[in-house]
Image: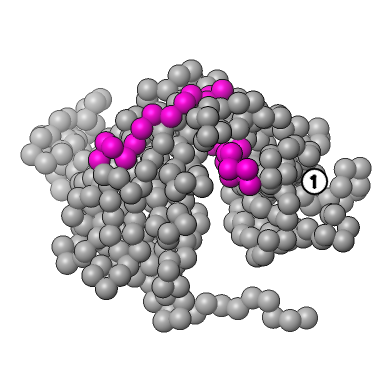
Amino acid sequence: QCKCWRLSGIDMPYKIGGVLYQLPDGRLLGFSSVFVFNKASNNLDPKPTGGNPTSGSISAVIIDLKAKKVTPIYRAKDNVAGAPPLKKSDTLSLMQRAFERSLQLRDGRVLRLGGHVIYQKDPPTRKCQTNICYYCAGKDCIPSDPKIACEDGKADKDCPFKKGTSAFTVLNDIEIYTPPDAKNPKGSVKVLKMPTARSSVGAIEMPDGKVLIVGGWGPKGEGKNQNYNTTYILDPNKEGKEAITNGPRTLFYREDHAMAVLKDKRILVTGGTNLNGVTINTCEYYDPAQGIFVHAPAMTITREDHVPMPLGPWLLFIGGESQGKSDLIRNSVEIFTADTGRYIGPQFLFSAVGTNESRTGATDFVAVSLDPNTVLIAGGQQGLQDRDGEYISSGRGSTRTLIFHYRQDTKK
């Protein structure tokens, strides 16, 4: 009967999505959710035009819960990593991107790797010349095809609206964000480049402080899903090309996979989507001491976009999806041991098999470790059970919250 939730009192004027990272001074860093925009626009307060998206001027925010203040960080001009910010008086810029991999290092720095964007040009202006509709980009105007009649001064009414052209772009940019200090009130950023552009990569900090970058998809990938089985080793303390070296190839092509560090210092890689666009249940270990990938036990259930979380002596890989009928949402969690990655098996999330209770899957949710023996997940998307007993995305947000407890007395 306690009040478990309270309003923050903060009015969030910007669109943000994904996770928040706590900075050393207690403030929070979050990234915007805009990824379709006009990169050439220098408008600091863009408005949608004729159905086109905004230019996405805000790329990140710093949230001060105590002061109830949200400080914007503007994107770089032309969305080029490391370029000056759109707001000339600002001291820092960060890229706009989506489906990148972000993670916080143990020293508090935050990395963003790869991803993709859709660059949308402004729609052409409409003019009526010689009673024919013309579409103009700058000074260049071309007649409509087929030629559409119009009246002088009524082009916006008589000439159908046309969207501007768009370009789908996969990124190879790495931004390493250093939290604010006395010299840099919004923080600072170092820019590196992966040899290949890739989205939906896996990345994790290893015990030695280097970052293992695994898989993803991009224009130089293989198969119809353009997947990679190549890896990189990133040293965030080095500069330029010396910071990134090629790692060993994985045993399986994969993107949208999950990764976790075991207590024996190996990395466990699970699931994802392969080069044929099929969700997989295969797993593998990366052994930093030997520099190779080796087979790990396969999961019982295929899954992608799932979330790894520690719980007592276990590693949980929670929820996620499977490409099948219609973004099949998983209502289960896979359990491995946290010491050596020994596979234990799956468990249902919201109900047990064989009951008549309403069951729902979970994906795109928030997960947090409350203490070593407690994990909370909240929100995300929920699935509806179909006639085959599977869980299909309904496009509905979930209001459900679930807390996992590991109780040492019962081993459950």
Question: Can residue 18 be seen in this snapshot?
Answer: yes
Residue sitting at the far top: 223
Q: Nearer the viewer, residue 181 or 81?
A: 181
How many numbered discs, if any?
Answer: 1
Relative to 318, residue 323 above or below: above
Q: Secondary structure at mark 1?
A: strand
> Residue at the spot x=47%, y=65% of the render?
22
- The quarter in which the N terminus is drawn is bottom right
Residue 259 lies in the magenta stretch: yes
- Provide residue 304's location: percent of width, then percent of height: 61, 36
Q: What is the span of residues highlighted in magenta in the rendered image?
A: 240-268
Residue 318 lies in the magenta stretch: no
What type is the residue that disc 1 sits on? Answer: Phe
> Residue at the spot x=39%, y=76% of the render?
69
Q: Nearer the viewer, residue 142 or 22?
A: 22
The residue beneath circle 1 is 348
> Residue at the spot x=45%, y=73% of the render?
26
Residue sitting at the far left: 139
Q: Is residue 14 left or right of residue 373?
A: left
Q: Is residue 394 left or right of residue 12?
A: right
Residue sitting at the far front: 289
